[in-house]
Image (spheres, rainbow, N blue to C red):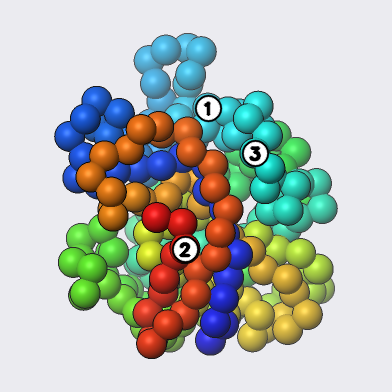
Amino acid sequence: MLSRLEFSSFLAYSPRGASEVSRRSQSILRSIKRDEVDPNPNVGSLIAFAVRRLLEAKPSFLGEFLGPEVILVPVPGSAPTGVNDALWVARRICEELLKQGLGAARLESLERVHRVPKSAWSSPDSRPTPEEHFESLRARRELYSPLCVTLVDDVVTQGSTALAAASRLTEAFPSVEVRLFALVRTRGLVSEIDSIVDPVAGTIELRNGRAWRDQP
C-alpha cells in the first residue's frame, strides 16, 4: 500500500453547511453525480461545464496533473464494475477532460471486483479503509505501461479509495507515476464554505491504516 499520493481538486462541497453557497455546492454535487443537464443552454451538462471552467481557470496545478501527455484512469465506483451498466461518473469526467485536451487517452485499468459500502452513506468511523478498498480492486494489465497516470474521480473525501486505486496501479505497473484529480473535494471539517470554485493541490497520506488529506 502506498503511503502517500499527490492529489488536486477544482470544486469544493460542504456536506452539512446551510449557507447559500454551501447549499449550492450540495446541489452541484448531486447534479454531477447524476450527470444532469442544466436547463440553461449556456451550461448544459454540469460535468462538461465544470471541466470547461477548470480549463478557463488554469489553476497552478493543472500542468502537473492533466495535459496532453497524461493517461486518465477513472476510479471505479463502490459497486462491481459493469453491474447493471450503472452511470460511471469518473469515466464521464475523463471523457470531458479528453475533449478539452487535458488527457492523452482513457484507460479503464481498474475494476471493482466486489462491492464496498458507499462512503457518502457511512459515518467517518465506518467508512471502508484503504486496505478494504485495495482488496476490492483489481488492476487490468494493459499492452503497455504508461509513464504518467492521473486517476480521475468525481469527489475526494478522506482519500481511501484513491490510495487503494493508486496502490493497485503501481503494483501492476511499478514504473508508473500516479496522481489523483478529483473534480470535487469534500470540506466536512468546516461549517460553511465561502466559494465553490476552490482549486487546491495537496497530499493524501496513510496513517495508522487510515487515509488523511492535508487540504481540509
Read off the residue under disc 3: 59
| Three-letter amino acid code of the residue under disc 1 | Phe
- For the point 38% across and 87% down, the residue is 208
Q: Is residue 129 left or right of residue 167?
A: left
- Viewer-side label of 2, 1: 2
Tell me, yes or no, if residue 88 can be seen here. no
Q: Residue 104: horizontal and vertical position, in percent?
A: 77, 50
SS at circle 1: helix
Q: Residues within 10 Å of mark 2 (few under 14, many from 20)?
A: few
Report the mark closest to the observer, 3 or 1: 3
In primary-sequence order, the first of circles 3 and 2 is: 3
Does 31 sit above or below residue 9? above
Element type where label 3 sits in the image: loop
Q: Amino acid at mark 2?
A: Asp
Q: Position of residue 40 (x, y in %)?
A: 42, 12
Residue 38 location, quadrant:
top left
Residue behind mark 2: 214
**Furthest-top residue in view?**
41
Label located before the other in sequence (2 or 1) = 1
Real-space CA distance between mark 3 and mark 2, rounded to the nearest whole angstrom: 18 Å
